[in-house]
Image (cartoon, helix red, strand yellow):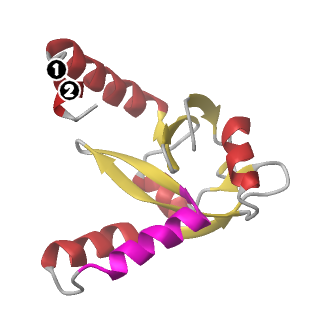
Amino acid sequence: MFRGSFEHTIDLKGRLSVPSKFREVLLGKGDDRIIITNFVVDGTHCLDVYPIDEWVRLEEEIRKKPKFERRMVLFQNYYLGGASECLVDKQGRILIPPRLRQYANLKRDVVVVSALDKFRVWDREAWKKIHTEAEQTFIQNPDSLGELGL
């Protein structure tokens, strides 16, 4: 399980050092492959990063869905079509493909954020906006967590 958020930088070659706590989770799975794909929250782009076993689990769930249902086809085109398999190198870095860096507007300063069985990579300014909006939602409506069943 991934937990927390960490500020990091992407180097000139597009490499991101995976936070050590997240690296421990990845190493515990015994596979240095990850899948990176595009994601969007309230119109703000970021990247989803999956350990390979979690990605395979997602693919298995998708296989159970109706193949020709329009929303499923759109989802597959967007989410699966945007996916790229990458390796975690010996220094604990991942090379984010240029297409995905551009999609999420990742330049240098990023935030790596837990999302349970995966993590997300955000441009630092985009993350501040999304985080503030989430905080305001819960301040304005304290019952929001209860409405989520939490």
Residue 38, by quadrant, is: bottom left
Residue annotated with mark 2: 146
**What SS does tag 2 mark?**
helix
Count the marks: how many?
A: 2
- Residue under the image location 20 percent in, 22 percent down: 137
Where is residue 148? Give x, y as percent.
Answer: 21, 35
Res. 60 image quadrant:
bottom left
- Looking at the picture, which amino acid does disc 1 mark? Asp
Q: Amino acid at mark 2?
A: Gly
Q: Which residue position holds label 1? A: 143
Q: Relative to residue 46, is residue 90 drawn left or right?
A: right
Q: Is residue 123 magenta?
A: no
Tell me where residue 97 appears, x and y as whole percent: 57, 62
Mark 1 vs 2: CB contact within 8 A: yes
Which residues lie in the magenta part?
Answer: 50-65
CA gap, disc 1 and disc 2:
5 Å
Name the foreground residue: 13 vs 129: 129
- Res. 5 in view: yes
